[in-house]
Image (spheres, rainbow, N blue to C red):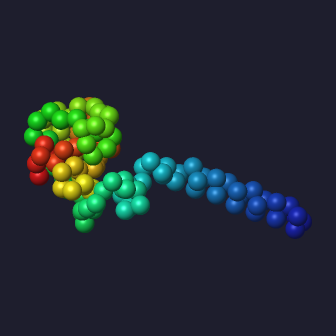
Amino acid sequence: MNITTRIAGAAASTALLVVGALAAAPTASAAPQSVSAAALPKACDWEWAWPQKEATTTAVNLRSGPGTNYTSLGTLYKSVHFTEYCNKKFAWGYGKVTSGPNAGRWGWVKESYLWP
């Protein structure tokens, strides 16, 4: 067997190993997600040191911004879990819905309707 054949065989084996490793690697969506300060809305004026796990005390709108003048993104029913990452003047919390029909959506909820 000459040197050219050996090099070609080694290159093919290496390519198969690399392709196999890439195919077995988890997708980006499978990786745990964390929220950086850069990803939080500019409307936030307070960022929690750790996410606040809360629940709604009654049915409340998930809003696109911190105020009733913003669009409703859906209704969160009583006892829906909401993880708050930051807030606006301790009146509106921004975070992710973690249970119920709107699970996975991000938005704003009036603080008076959240309970730890």
Q: Point out the residue furthest to the front here.
A: 69
Q: Position of residue 31 (x, y in %)?
A: 42, 54
Q: Nearer the viewer, residue 85 or 101?
A: 85
Q: Is residue 37 above or below residue 106?
A: below
Q: Position of residue 107 (x, y in %)?
A: 30, 43
Q: Residue at x 38, y 61 (%)?
A: 36
Q: Is residue 27 above or below residue 48?
A: above
Q: Is residue 39 left or right of residue 57?
A: right
The answer to whether residue 104 of the structure is visible from this angle is no
Q: Position of residue 85 (x, y in %)?
A: 27, 56
Q: Is residue 60 left or right of residue 44?
A: left
Q: Nearer the viewer, residue 52 or 33?
A: 52
The answer to whether residue 64 of the structure is visible from this angle is yes
Q: Nearer the viewer, residue 99 or 109?
A: 109
Q: Is residue 43 above or below residue 65?
A: below
Q: Residue at x 32, y 34 (%)?
A: 71
Q: Is residue 50 left or right of residue 15?
A: left
Give the quarter of the figure containing the N terminus.
bottom right
Q: Position of residue 112 (x, y in %)?
A: 12, 46
Q: Is residue 77 left or right of residue 47?
A: left
Give the image quarter of residue 79.
top left
Q: Is residue 17 above or below residue 80?
A: below
Q: Residue at x 28, y 49 (%)?
A: 95
Give the number of callouts: 0
Q: Nearer the viewer, residue 62 or 28?
A: 62
